[in-house]
Image (spheres, grey):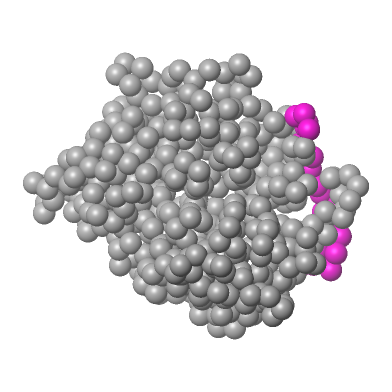
Amino acid sequence: MPPAGSRVYQAGSGATVYGGRFANALLDLVAAAPENSWVKANLNDFWTVWPPEDFRPCRDKVNPNPSTPSSVIRAWSSFAWDPAQSRLVLYGGGHANYDGNEVYVFDGKTRHWSLAYFPSDVELLDAATSEYATVDGPLHSPVSAHTYDNSEYLPKLGRFMTFGGGAAHRGGSYVVIDGAARRPSGPYTLDLANAGLGMVGGVTGSNVKRLSSANVNLQGADAWAVRDYYKDHPDPNGALPSMAGHISSGTAYAEENGHDVIYLTTYGGYYLHRIEFVDADYRNDLISVVGRPALDPMDPVATLAFDPVKRIVLSLGQQPLKVFWGWDVSGPPVASFGVVSAGLTGPGVAAWLAAFQSMHGIDYDAVNRRFVMWSEGGQLFSLTHAGGSLAGNWRIEELRPNSGTPGVDRPKTRAELEAETFGVYPKSDVGVNGKWKWASDLNAFVGLQHNYFGNVWIYKPGNWVAPSFIGIQNNLLPGPARPEALR
């Protein structure tokens, strides 16, 4: 029997009824939607939960003119999906776009955006290098950063995680400044236990203080923690030096050995790293190089996805050099393989080549055992390997979900976004490469679009089955809910 309080949902075939993990409005919405369709999930707009202006950091304290948090979505950003709570976690900004390191949550149970933590104030450390830090310091909270495709949720640890990159205002990777010591940074994790309680993410009183907030000391959640690899993490495999540059980095999540595992490429994607998060002590993380570089450079804006069945880590490339890059991680570390357009087959090749250039989304469909790619708008494509060399025989098909009214029945194209008149800043995203995730609690994809509205789009694939309340794991097929044809 399903646990008390859970829903009962019908499988797409209509033949079998399964128990949902728990009752929530988002799963209700997905269950009611037609297969192979888009549905918009958010009931409020992203901009309505921004911190008040006097709580946003800015460089000029004398003549403050804080930039808008719209860059948290727009500027080379990504989100993480928490399958345990059916929620989207968002942090971003960075470089020359926005100073705020605040965190937002879209809660699938209520279908509403909220501000999880207020931003920290920032201070200039070195004018010559444009080195900024939060006022409580990098050991307590990160500055804002472009997150590319490296925001993930670690369900086993119960933490949001990001490697950042393109940090404000220097534009480089995170650094840890510890007294006189300055070193590269590992990823930051974030505890969301106190989200939505009006706290600042770092230490008490580290919030912005100017004008109406000048005498306000917000309670600190102490929610951020840096995994300070370059301080005292053992490195018997020599993996740390090649992992230091997180600009344009990409990540893919898996659960292996009962632990959270992240596959990571750093700038240029030359090496593929594997990090196994054993427990809360970062010194116990297992870090190794599992993919060696090829001679050709990869797309500098990596977008990763992982097939746990064939054990292939795949990245969208950048035409005309390569259309895909990837690694086979089923054995010892091997050089990356590259796929050119001649290695593509299937009825969707021409349409895909016309639509995809760079910085688009890709993730793995665990029910249909395929990669699915999103390029803004409502257009979607599936990608499967038909056997033989991984450098070729990749089949692309256009999925053709409902087209309908843009922004109502499907996401908007970049041109449609630019035609809007809302706000004074651009509405289009700088790519959607980090804004496309498989949600194992929904057996569906989640996409994010629109800098102001924060529209959360759900794509319900064909052959949909309700997620089981038993053994839900990211990137793994939920056993009791699988139709017989997919076993």
Rendering quarter of residue 96: top left
Horizontal side, residue 64 vs residue 119: left or right: left
Q: For the point 38% across and 58% down, which residue is it? A: 105
Outermost right residue: 388
Question: Could you say which is closer to the camera, residue 278 or residue 243?
Answer: 278
Q: For the point 40% across and 50% down, which residue is it? A: 91
Horizontal side, residue 11 vs residue 179: left or right: right
Q: Position of residue 278 (x, y in %)?
A: 53, 32
Q: Position of residue 445 (x, y in %)?
A: 59, 63
Residue 347 is a magenta residue: yes
Question: Could you say which is closer to the camera, residue 200 or residue 50?
Answer: 200
Residue 144 is a magenta residue: no
Q: Quadrant of the N terminus?
A: bottom right
Query: Does 474 appear above or below 311?
Result: below
Q: Position of residue 27 (x, y in %)?
A: 51, 70
Horizontal side, residue 245 vs residue 453: left or right: right
Query: Does 318 appear above or below 236?
Result: below
Horizontal side, residue 38 vs residue 344: left or right: left
Q: Position of residue 134 (x, y in %)?
A: 29, 36
Outermost front residue: 1
The answer to whether residue 321 is seen in the rendering is no
Q: For the point 71% across and 71% down, which residue is it? A: 463
The answer to whether residue 284 is seen in the rendering is yes
Question: Could you say which is closer to the camera, residue 342 or residue 108?
Answer: 108
Outermost bottom residue: 404
Q: Quadrant of the C terminus?
A: bottom right
The segment highlighted magenta reads 331-351
Q: For the point 77% across and 29% down, which residue is it? A: 332
Question: Could you say which is closer to the camera, residue 63 or residue 477?
Answer: 477
Tag count: 0
